[in-house]
Amino acid sequence: QVQLVQSGAEVKKPGASVKVSCKASGYTFTDYAIHWVRQAPGQRLEWMGWINAGNGVTKYSQKFQDRVTITRDTSASAAYMELGILRSEDTAVYYCAREHSGYYQPEIWGQGTMVTVSS
Amino acid sequence: QSALTQPASVSGSPGQSITISCTGTSSDVGRYDYVSWYQQHPGKAPRLMIYGVTNRPSGVSNRFSGSKSGSTASLTISGLQAEDEADYYCSSYTSSSTWVFGGGTKLTVL
């Protein structure tokens, strides 16, 4: 079955960067885009960006444009989200999600990765 | 891109129907039929309940239905059950080629 498995929890200091991985299985990785969405504690879902896993083209939310990089490794069927210049407000659960075929919106979600930014 | 507007909370008794609204603009909800709804239980990842405004993924109960009028989309849950108690989020594609979520609605089953 289609599954997205993310890397484990991270604790980072302010100013550092974090890279979260998302390994896909159960489908042809390059046929679908991968979204990245985050959720701070008690807060709403926030879309960060996405990558076309086939050609590597990305699009980012204006809010994160200057600090986020989304990449993919087709040989590993994995996508990555790197967020730099971390601050305490970046403490959140980060999710990857595969797009829905035909409608493009997030459909199949990973389990989430907790990133804590603390000095 | 501002978040889509949802009521903070709604409630209903078992067996009743409730509707959650999601208001956007002519640049997102009003322009595209790429509106989706997600259910999220505490500590869990979101689950897609409605996509393309009105479509249900396989495995989602037909008690869940979606609609749209102008720049406002709606999620209706009929025959409320205790397990429906969760947070619900709408989402839409935007004219900036990005996606935006709503602020979320907490559904309480009384």
Image (cartoon, rainbow, N blue to C red):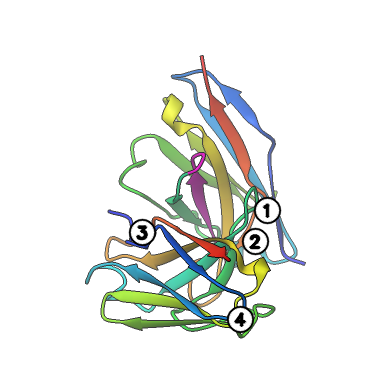
Cα separation between marks 3 and 2: 21 Å
Q: In the rendered image, which residue does mark 3 sit on?
A: B98
Marks 3 & 2, CB-CB < 8 Å contact: no
Q: Which residues are magenta?
A: A32-42
Q: Which residue is mark 2?
A: A29
Residue drawn at x 60%, y 24% is A11
Side (left or right) of A36 relative to B44? left
Q: Pointers 1 and 2 in contact (CB under 8 A)?
A: yes
The local secondary structure at tag 4 comes to loop
Q: Report the mark closest to the observer, 4 or 2.
A: 4
Residue at x-position 61% and y-position 36%: A114
Judge whether A34 appears above or below B16 on screen: above
Residue at mark 1: A77
Magenta residue check for A34 = yes
Q: Amino acid at mark 4?
A: Gly
Residue B31 percent location from the top left of the image: 27, 76
For marks 4 and 3, the one nearer the N-term is 4
Verify whether residue B34 appears in magenta: no
Q: Quadrant of residue B23?
A: bottom left
* C-beta proximity under 8 Å, tags 3 and 1: no
Extreme residue in the left direction: B26
**Dot 2, how many residues are within 10 Å of its Cα: few (below 14), some (14-19), or many (20+)?**
many
Q: Do marks 4 and 3 share a subunit?
A: yes
* Three-letter residue code for mark 3: Thr
Return the disc, 1 or 2, that comes first in the chain's sequence. Answer: 2
Question: Residue tagged by mark 4?
Answer: B15
Say what amino acid the circle numbered 2 marks. Phe
Which part of the image, by quadrant, shows the C terminus of chain B? bottom right
Q: Tag 4, which chain?
A: B
Q: Chain of mark 3?
A: B
Work out which residue is located at the far top of the displayed protein and give it: A119
